[in-house]
Image (cartoon, rainbow, N blue to C red):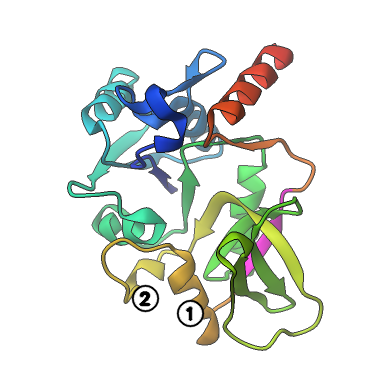
Amino acid sequence: MDALILAAGLGTRLGELTRSTPKPLIRVGGTAMLEIVASRLVAAGVDRLIINTHHLADQIVDFARAREGFGVEVHFSHEADAPLETGGAVLHARELLRRDVPFFLHNSDILTDLPLTELYRTHQQENPLATLAVMERPSSRYLLFDEQGLFGRADEGKQLRIEVRAAVGTVRKLGFAGVHVVSPHFPDLLEERGAFSILDPYLRLATAGHRIQAFSVDGFSWIDIGKPEQLEEANRQAIASG
């Protein structure tokens, strides 16, 4: 089982904290976010990690090697010129991914206790193109799902709403949790190039009949550490949990 951990971002919203430290190495409760995410993936059965890098990449490589790859095989996909976003990261790492099993795609700044093993098992049983961990939460950005899967997305701040086909049955507006399980043939279907969101090919492929399904993680803890106040909240939660 492979996992691609997205760790190439600049982390600019964290200000001075990420000028000399890459965002995935910022600590929560005394432990780097990258280590928290990697350890959870390994506990779920991942035996091979691919970590994409850009900003202060040497620090991430040294950190992972100092921890002996978190106990598994580790490879690095370096994005030299600029971060390639989620979709571009998958395309760039394509040759490192095993092509016979689904793989996890996990943001390095998402801290959650959502059930990774169940997410992976559900994907295997239902065999869609991708399975996205989602939740009902207040957000100006959300994905649109109906009875056939993903069919659109919206960003109210940008006054953007995209629907690639007519909805079938009940429509749900769901917040994305930053964790996917992706079928191994997905990288071969990518036509996009450069830096691009993975939502672009997801929606393009949904129009061609591929199913991108939702996996509800309502009720599980989840925090996206994008801003200083979110980092402070994550540390408070870590202290409270002991």
User: Is disc 1 surrounded by few (<14), some (14 to 19) or many (20+) residues within 10 Å?
Assistant: many
In the depicted view, which residue is nearer to us: 188 or 42?
188
SS for callout 2 = helix
Residue span colored magenta: 212-217
The amino acid type, in three-letter code, at marker 1 is Leu
In the rendered image, residue 13, in percent from the top left (x then y), is placed at 46, 36
State the mark number for residue 189: 2
Q: Is residue 206 magenta?
A: no
Of callouts 2 and 1, the N-terminal one: 2
Q: In this view of the protein, can residue 71 be seen by the observer?
A: no
In the depicted view, which residue is nearer to us: 126 or 153?
153
Secondary structure mostly seen in magenta is: strand
**Residue 85 sits in quarter:** bottom left
Residue visible at 37% across and 32% down?
72
**Residue 146 sits in quarter:** bottom right
Residue visible at 66% across and 57% down?
140
SS for callout 1 = helix
**Residue 20 sits in quarter:** top left
Mark 1 — residue?
205
User: Is disc 2 surrounded by few (<14), some (14 to 19) or many (20+) residues within 10 Å?
Assistant: few
Q: Quick check: marks 2 and 1 in contact, CB under 8 Å?
A: yes
In the rendered image, residue 224, in percent from the top left (x then y), is placed at 58, 38
Q: Is residue 188 above or below residue 123?
A: below
Residue visible at 69% across and 53% down?
139
In the depicted view, which residue is nearer to us: 163 or 112?
163
